[in-house]
Image (cartoon, rainbow, N blue to C red):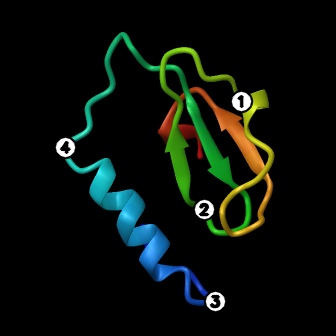
Amino acid sequence: MSKVKNGATGLVDDIQSKFKGFKLGSNNYGYLVCEDCKGYYKLEKGENPEDFDSCRCGGTLKFSKKLDKI
């Protein structure tokens, strides 16, 4: 992921570190992707996209089943 404008680089670095070595498996519940900063969050068991209002940056979140569709 390239650097994000508006000082959100720290957020991007934090997200990247959490997903280092991540492999898709049978426990893939999808992702919430921010339309503004392009950060993403992997949904965990029991979480629904409707549980989240907005990104930490204030941007709009969009659900995606796979990261390659971002």
Earlier residue among tags 2 and 4: 4
Earlier residue among tags 3 and 4: 3
Q: Are marks 3 and 4 in contact (CB under 8 Å)?
A: no
Q: Mark 3 packing: few (<14 Cα in 10 Å), some, or many (20+)?
A: few
Earlier residue among tags 1 and 4: 4
Circle 4 sits on which residue?
Answer: 21
Circle 2 sits on which residue?
Answer: 38
Circle 1 sits on which residue?
Answer: 49
Q: Is residue 29 above or below residue 21?
A: above
Task: Measure the alpha-carbon separation of dots 1 and 4.
Answer: 24 Å
The residue type indicated by label 3 comes to: Asn
Q: 33 or 68: which is nearer to us? A: 33
Circle 3 sits on which residue?
Answer: 6
The residue type indicated by label 1 comes to: Pro
The residue type indicated by label 2 comes to: Lys
The residue type indicated by label 4 comes to: Gly
Q: Under tag 1, what secondary structure?
A: helix
Q: 20 or 67: which is nearer to us? A: 20
Residue 20: x and y, percent? 23, 50
Of circles 1 and 4, which is in front? 1
Of circles 1 and 2, which is in front? 1
Earlier residue among tags 2 and 3: 3
Residue 14: x and y, percent? 37, 65
Q: Under tag 2, what secondary structure?
A: loop
Task: Measure the alpha-carbon separation of dots 2 and 4.
Answer: 19 Å
Q: Quadrant of the N terminus?
A: bottom left
